[in-house]
Amino acid sequence: LMLYETQGLSSEDPRVTTVARSLWAWDEYAITWTNSPQTTGASGATASYEERWYEIDVTSYFTDWLSGQTDNNGILVDSEIGYTPPRFIFASREYAEADKRPHVILEYAW
């Protein structure tokens, strides 16, 4: 998973950004921080508040989804538990600069 950090606050201490599989289906127009789904299988990357790309390995998620072992209910991007901000903002799928929107790189082997 490739995520682009849009806020350059390089004077802040690095922190771990986590990505985990959602355990149940959710609706992007109804989700809030108080009703966010439980997750499992977190992967992480240390982020340093620089405007740059961060890569987080989600290979096992896709392996499980494609093999039918688990349902694809999406993923949740978050911080370490108990972390207090300043803001850490990744470009979304609606971000004005299309080349900085999140994407997944899939490599297939036959």
Image (cartoon, rainbow, N blue to C red):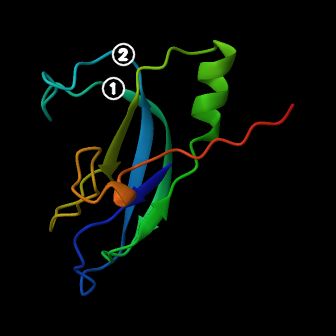
Q: Nearer the viewer, residue 79 or 81?
A: 79
Mark 2 in CB contact with mark 1 (< 8 angstroms): yes
> SS class of the residue under badge 2?
loop
Across and down, in percent, residue 71 comes to: 51, 14
- Residue shown at 87% from the left, 31% from the top: 110
Classify 59 as above or below 99: above
Q: Nearer the viewer, residue 4 or 74?
A: 4
Q: Is residue 58 left or right of residue 49?
A: right
Q: Quadrant of residue 5?
A: bottom left
- Residue linked to disc 2: 24
Across and down, in percent, residue 69 comes to: 63, 14
- Residue linked to disc 1: 38
Number of numbered labels in the structure image: 2
How far apart are the two marked residues, 2 and 1, measured between alpha carbons?
7 Å
- Residue shown at 23% from the left, 60% from the top: 89
What's the residue type where badge 1 is placed? Gln
> SS class of the residue under badge 1?
loop
Classify 9 as above or below 108: below
- Residue shown at 22% from the left, 71% from the top: 7
Classify 78 as above or below 63: below
Give neighbour class at mark 2: few <14, some 14-19, many 20+ (Cα, 10 Å): few
Q: Residue furthest bottom?
A: 11
Q: Nearer the viewer, residue 50 or 107?
A: 107
Across and down, in percent, residue 33 comes to: 15, 35
Comes first in the chain, label 2 or label 1: 2
Q: Is residue 94 left or right of residue 62?
A: left
Which circle, 2 or 1, is nearer the viewer?
2
Q: Is residue 28 left or right of residue 99?
A: left
